[in-house]
Amino acid sequence: MKLTIKKVTEDNYNEILGLRVNKDQEGFIETTEKCLEESNELELWRPVGIYSEDELVGFAMYGLFEDEDEDGRVWLDRFMIGEKYQGNGYGKVGIEVLIKRLYKEYKCKEIFLSVYDNNPNAIKLYKRLGFRFNGELDINGERVMLVDLKGMED
């Protein structure tokens, strides 16, 4: 399976707005509309669509917080696979593609994300991809996870 990442532009903006998660997942992530509003308010956010060929299957938003830690922290702040595409492996491959992109874009040693304790499917996925809890909580009470990228090749 090959997935690609595309920036949110005028061409795919409305398509991104139409992406939804399952009803039982709505409390775990903001709507794409809210995410895009936040990206307009804070320039560091990079919203992107996740595509299988030309079909939008997911959404993510990431950014570098330069004032966190010595070298800043790269956050994969939002990640979702659309409800009709879930259960097909897009989540795992999507995270892998995003990790490579963030490493290449920021030359970072770690990537951070946060997750609610009551989201076991996301926790299981992130752990499978090398993320681990670091003992921190974010401002919303979500547990912070990170993946170590030292030794990753370009």
Image (cartoon, helix red, strand yellow):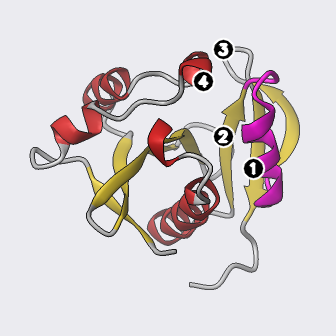
Pointers 2 and 1 in contact (C-beta within 8 Å): yes
How far is mark 3 from mark 4, CA to CA? 16 Å
Of pointers 3 and 2, the one earlier in the residue sequence: 2
Of pointers 1 and 4, the one earlier in the residue sequence: 4
Q: Is there any visible trace of residue 88 in the rendered image? A: yes
Q: Secondary structure at mark 3?
A: loop
Q: What residue did someone put label 2 on? A: 113
Q: Which residues are magenta?
A: 116-131
How far is mark 2 from mark 1, CA to CA? 9 Å
Give me the disc on residue 18.
Answer: none
Residue 44 vs 23, above or below: the answer is below
Q: Secondary structure at mark 1?
A: helix
- Name the amino acid, label 3: Asn
Of pointers 3 and 4, the one earlier in the residue sequence: 4
- Name the amino acid, label 2: Leu
Q: Residue furthest right?
A: 135
Q: Give residue 95's quadrant in the image.
A: bottom right
Q: In the visual, does 118 lie left or right of 43? A: right
Of pointers 2 and 1, the one earlier in the residue sequence: 2
Spot occupied by residue 64 in the image (x, y as percentages of width and height):
49, 46
Q: What residue did someone put label 1 on? A: 126
The residue under the point 82% across, 29% down is 136
The residue under the point 30% across, 30% down is 36
Give me the disc on residue 140.
Answer: 3
Q: In the visual, does 58 lie left or right of 48? A: right
The residue under the point 75% across, 49% down is 126
- Name the amino acid, label 1: Tyr
Spot occupied by residue 19 in the image (x, y as percentages of width and height):
35, 35
Q: What residue did someone put label 4 on? A: 25
Mark 1 closeness class: few <14, some 14–19, many ≥20 residues within 10 Å: many
Give whichever of 58, 129 is nearer the camera.
58
Q: Secondary structure at mark 2?
A: strand
